[in-house]
Image (cartoon, grey):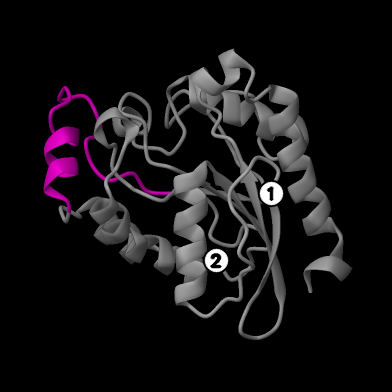
Amino acid sequence: MESFISRLISCNRCPRLTQYRNSFPDNYWKKPVPPNGEINAEIVIIGLAPAANGGNRTGRMFTGDESSNNLTNALYAVGFANQPFSISKDDGLKLVRIYITSAVKCAPPQNKPNKDEIINCSTFLEEEVRMLENAKVYIALGKVAWDSIINVFKKIGYSVPNVKFYHGALVKVTKPDMSIIWLIGSYHPSPRNMKTGRLTMNMLVEIFSTAKRLVSNKERIT
């Protein structure tokens, strides 16, 4: 894992993203943002990319902005975090059974990575999936995350039904050894989604409650 993170944070593969992240103040992280959580986690959360003033500033996924606190508040409600906020690397946050990563590891301009940047970063996401041997449930926050993880699953030989992204989508994924894992779709906990009511805290909590039930129901995931 240390080797993976070292290679990740030194990546300069995408010129546009490298230039953008380096345009921020000197007290920002300004590197690709590594995952947060344990590699033996049972539940994997995949976001779009680090936020310009969130992960790109703090150096930790879903940390330091409104989206971060929305997500962490929901995790806390279900027992997957020890506190309902995520504001800095030294805020004492501890995740339980959770691994948080992203489809794209650098903050993109306007939160919109292009196709080539998503493809470039998919090599890191693929490596993570291969390392996450204990993962039973993946949660994709938004369509880009959904499409990215499905593409990785297919590339490494997982059998995935053809299901388009929607909030609450639940897909049974079969690994080459015939064991079963699950993919859940959720709207991203962005301020826009939360303030317009497209996504509510109750809706987000229900996503993680579903993941918790799937992990606990051994008959359905083996």
Magenta residue check for 18: yes
Which secondary structure, mark 1?
A: loop
The quadrant of the picture occupied by the C terminus is bottom right
In this rendering, position of residue 43 left or right of residue 123: right
Question: Which one is in front, 85 or 195?
Answer: 195
Is residue 214 in view from this perspective?
yes
Q: Amino acid at mark 1?
A: Ala
Q: Main secondary structure of the magenta part?
A: loop
* Residue 136, placed above or below residue 114: below
In this rendering, position of residue 206 left or right of residue 143: right
Q: Which of the numbered marks, if any, corresponds to residue 169?
A: 1
Q: Residues within 10 Å of mark 2 (few under 14, many from 20)?
A: some
Q: Disc 2 designates what residue? A: 132
* Residue 85, placed above or below residue 19: above
In this rendering, position of residue 200 left or right of residue 19: right
Residue at 64% across, 68% down: 161
Residue at 30% across, 28% down: 52
Is residue 36 in view from this perspective?
no
Ranked by sequence position, the earlier of labels 1 and 2 is 2
Q: Residues within 10 Å of mark 1 (few under 14, many from 20)?
A: some
Q: Position of residue 131 (x, y in %)?
A: 49, 69
The quadrant of the picture occupied by the N terminus is bottom left
Which secondary structure, mark 2?
A: loop
Farthest residue, direction top:
195
Q: Position of residue 179 (x, y in %)?
A: 71, 78
**Magenta region:** 14-36
